[in-house]
Amino acid sequence: MRDHNPYVSILTNMHRTTLYIGVTNSLQRRVWQHRHGDKDGFAQRYNLTRMVYFEHFRDVNNAIAREKQLKGWLRAKKIALIERQNPRWEDLGEQLEQEPQIDNREAWISTK
């Protein structure tokens, strides 16, 4: 699954204690990074491996604006958004859980 359109995603941990909102151009790569990538990052520190929400955009500027908007919301409003689309908080990333193609992973590593 190769995809280079921008997405805003929300990840959480098993206990739903922390919500992480970010922009990516590949949901598959982002899920892989959060589960297997940088051990020193915020997502690893809080074990944010479950993607519970995402939105697709055609334009990266709109995705970035939406990310900023969501980050400004109170936690209760974020939870309501997630529960409208994913009431059982299923891990939407499970179907994407495979190592990304080498060129995607190398592009991520080279930008660190």
Image (spheres, rainbow, N blue to C red):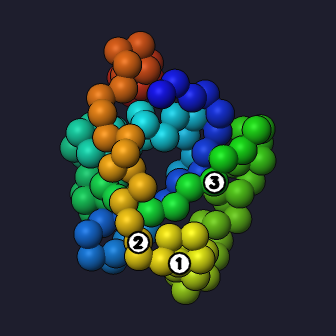
| Residue ID at (65%, 71%) | 72
In the visual, does 89 lie left or right of 57?
Answer: left
| Residue ID at (72%, 44%) | 57
Q: Is residue 43 visible?
A: yes
Disc 3 and disc 1 in contact, CB within 8 angstroms: no
Residue at disc 2, secondary structure: loop
Q: Position of residue 96 (x, y in %)?
A: 38, 41
Disc 1 and disc 2 in contact, CB within 8 angstroms: yes
Residue topped by disc 1: 83
Sequence-first disc among 1 and 2:
1
Q: What's the residue type where badge 3 is placed? A: Glu
**Mark 3 and mark 1: span between their CA atoms?**
14 Å
Q: What's the residue type where badge 2 is placed? A: Trp
Residue topped by disc 2: 89
In the visual, does 5 lie left or right of 26?
Answer: right
Using the image, determine if residue 83 lies above or below residue 57: below
